[in-house]
Amino acid sequence: MTNKIIEFVQAKKEITSNKLYVFHWPSDYGGADTKLDHTLSILSKFMDIVCIPNDYRQLQQENWIESLGSRGIKTMSREEFIALPDSLDGHAIAFSNGSFVSRLNLCSLAKSKGLKVYWGNEMMWHFPGELEQIKAGNIDVVLYTSKFNRKTLEPGYLNANPKVESYIVGNYIDPDRFPYKERQPKNNLTIGRLSRADTEKYSCDLPIFYESLGLKNAKYRIMAWNKRVAKMYDWHYFGDEWDLLPPNKESALDFLYSLDLFVYKLGHKFKESWGRSTVEAMLTGCIPIVPSGHNFEEFIIQEKTGFMCDTYEDYRNVCIELQNNSRKRYAISKQASVYASSVLCNKEKHEKIWRSVFNVW
Amino acid sequence: MFGNYCWWSIGDGMHGRMLKGTVKSMRKHNIEGDIHLWTDQNEVEGATVHHIGTNSFDKKHYLFKLRFLRDYVQKLPYDYFIFFDADTYFVRQLPYSPLMMMQGSPVHSFLESYTSHPKNKRFDWWDCWLTKYEQLMRDRGVISRRIYNVNAGLWIVQKEAVMTFYNLCDDFWRYCESQGILFTEEAPLAYATHMLCGDAEAHTLINFTDMWVSDWTGNFDNRLPDGSAWHFTDYFTGERTQVNPAIVHCMRSKGVLSKIGE
């Protein structure tokens, strides 16, 4: 009986603090980690943030300690968090940190300390333990990255807990970190793609698909590439026109500057919940040529800010047309960048969304 | 990038005897490449026999071709494996290397008839409506503008792509099964080819009628092709095209082919 009263009191507890415990650590690689990095720049304007990595060794990454410190963000280890009192006032959040909901069980720990718990799943499937945590009431709010993401995940969440709160928070990229750069009006284009080195993200015919687009003297650049991805294409001979880069071999910015077209054909079973690298490409002026569906309708205005393709022939026709028409290429490149920075990654808009989530004005 | 290749096939009983006839025709015309046969025949002159018992393998839905490739053929020391059906007959030397048909892809099969051709008169394939077949292909990621069927009488897979090819075929067959459609090996073969070939149009039959064509209508009704031109009939439109391939999939000449193998 006493436990039930405590649970009731915790559930109804008013959060008055703007303290935010972030159970996640930023990095330069992968959608969720980079999203966190950029989003922290917004959140740090009105939240008092502490970042808590899964692994204490991440606290020794001086570049990130410095980067977070410069934004007024503190850090602590899991052990230090565990040692905090059991009656905290504030919020806890994690993005696609599987350990938060399963192995490390930080989610229930944060809840038991009185925090309001927010969970953002950037994927298109449920993490192990995620639904159980929602069912147990250890997650108060779920955060979607897009309508597409919501459509996929919401049924599971509502089935686990019909009263779970939710917001579509989108995905923020700081436009200042991906400034526009005008590409040269050349005819031999460089096309490529940027993503995690996840085999699911790569179409089974990638090299022959690129090569059969029919571009003249094209260069092909891919990041990130690793042994598992390479194994998919053992059958292909990659000539000098190919540049296959391991993760973070170049900064995302430098890599995208090297591309004229961002040709993003995905693995046939993969669903992109948002498409962060595509928007990064747009910001820099690299023209996105992406598959129809997924979440790309949110940021591609056909033939204005990029291209969505249904068929191989669509991809080929668009690429050839852009190769042969540098004026059109320039116009779309510019429009993509302006749209991405002013609409998709509008700082004020994103700040408003996050203030609404945490009810901090 | 070219490499070495072998021809391979499977056949027991009558099909084993037919294979003898096929190999005879290959050797008569000095077809290059080793030949590997999984057969109940004790010896086939001009080929390496991998002996199997009569009726020793599951022939349901003809999926054994894919399983033999995965389990046995890919272990052979060649870069490419060219499958031919037992009822195949070579009428002359090949006009070019069969690997020319790969065009950078790890798989080649002859994409034959366009499922949405406005002149189609037939609208089903293997007891599946073409609209359903198209949908199944789209569901599993095929993005070529046109979708084709294939005849599985001759196809090529690159060694390093065997497992990718097999897994695509298997995945598609199982997906179709879950939708109530039990295909033979042909639909999975068509699927894997569409998925792995970049530009599907580069693999259509019409580009290679000097190399291989299937005589499914029986131009050579129980007689052997003699190198003269004949008419191929499109499976869906019924339109006839004059062809004269070096390799004939003489589906209606099984009896005479097995006789010359005896």
Image: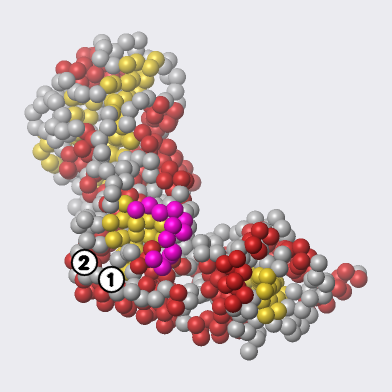
Toward the viewer: B260 or B46? B46
> Badge 2 local density, few (<14 within 10 Å), some, or many (20+)?
few
Residue A63 on image: x %, y %: 57, 67
Q: Seen from this angle, which residue lies furthest left?
A: B228
Identify the residue shown where x is 54% and y is 62%. A123
Residue A228 on image: x %, y %: 47, 46
Q: Can residue B54 be seen in this view?
A: no
Badge 2 amino acid? Lys
- In this rendering, is residue B22 above or below A20? above
Residue at mark 2 shares a chain with residue at mark 1:
yes
- In this rendering, is residue A75 above or below B129? below
* Residue identified by numbered label 2: A186
SS at circle 1: loop
Q: Is residue B102 magenta?
A: no
SS at circle 2: loop
- Magenta stretch, residue numbers: A243-254
Residue A241 on image: x %, y %: 28, 52
State the mark number for residue A183: 1
Identify the residue shown where x is 47% and y is 62%. A272
